[in-house]
């Protein structure tokens, strides 16, 4: 079993910064990819950033502003968000997909709210 717990959300003014954390527990290793998604009111959930053994990837809307990283010793993935814009307002979710012998399973955190005021 895997559990993902996000923290670090809050209210910030446009141009400000926030750092989100996602603590992973259970059967997760450095080989597993981790990702951040976000969902704004009335919109579909969208991929923000991913990190795996081969590197990182970002949505075009956050490239150059957001940085995903992980501390394998702490089983934690981070999302450093700089130059925040009102359109970054959303609930941010940590995500992991693990391929068990019985098949792949998606795991999501409970989400953390990020609100950027103009």
Image: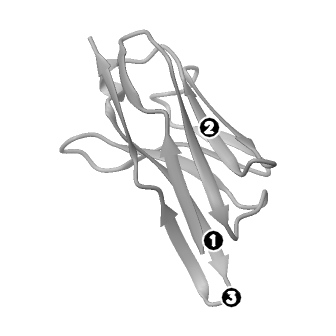
User: Label 3: which residue?
Assistant: 101
* Residue sitting farthest toward the left: 42
Mark 1 → mark 3, Cα distance in angstroms: 10 Å
Earlier residue among tags 2 and 1: 2
Considering the image in quadrants, where does the C terminus appear?
top left
Residue under the image location 42 percent in, 9 percent down = 15
Mark 2 → mark 1, Cα distance in angstroms: 19 Å
Q: Which mark lies nearer to you, 2 or 1?
A: 2
User: Label 1: which residue?
Assistant: 98
Considering the image in quadrants, where does the N terminus appear?
bottom right
Q: Residue 37, how many percent across, how many down?
A: 45, 46
Residue under the image location 29 percent in, 50 percent down = 44
Helix, strand or loop at label 1? It is: strand
Q: Is residue 75 above or below residue 17?
A: below
Helix, strand or loop at label 3? It is: loop
Mark 3 → mark 2, Cα distance in angstroms: 28 Å
Q: Would residue 31 be found to the left or right of residue 59 on screen?
A: right
Q: Would residue 112 be found to the left or right of residue 101 on screen?
A: left
Question: Which of the 4 image quadrants contains residue 99?
Answer: bottom right
User: Label 2: which residue?
Assistant: 78
Q: Is residue 104 above or below residue 64?
A: below
Helix, strand or loop at label 2? It is: strand
Residue under the image location 42 percent in, 32 percent down = 9
Please name the colour scheme applied to the rendered image: one colour
Question: Which of the 4 image quadrants contains residue 42?
Answer: top left
Q: Residue 95, how many percent across, how many down?
A: 52, 56
In this view, the residue in front, 59 or 21, is 21
Residue under the image location 52 percent in, 17 percent down = 82
Q: Is residue 11 visible?
A: yes
**Label 1 CA crowd tier, 10 Å (few <14, some 14–19, many 20+):** some
Is the Cβ of the residue at disc 3 closer than 8 Å to that at disc 2?
no
Q: Is residue 95 visible?
A: no
């Amino acid at each position: 079993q895997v559990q993902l717990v996000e923290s670090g959300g809050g209210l910030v003014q446009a141009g400000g910064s926030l750092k989100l954390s996602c603590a992973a527990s259970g059967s997760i290793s450095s080989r597993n990819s981790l990702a951040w998604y976000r969902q704004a009111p009335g919109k579909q959930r969208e991929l923000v950033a991913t990190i795996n053994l081969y590197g990182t990837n970002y949505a075009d809307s956050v490239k150059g502003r957001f940085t995903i990283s992980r501390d394998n010793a702490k089983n934690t993935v981070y999302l450093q968000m700089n130059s925040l814009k009102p359109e970054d307002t959303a609930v941010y979710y940590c995500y992991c997909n693990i391929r068990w012998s019985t098949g792949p399973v998606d795991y999501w955190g409970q989400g953390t709210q990020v609100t950027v005021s103009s």
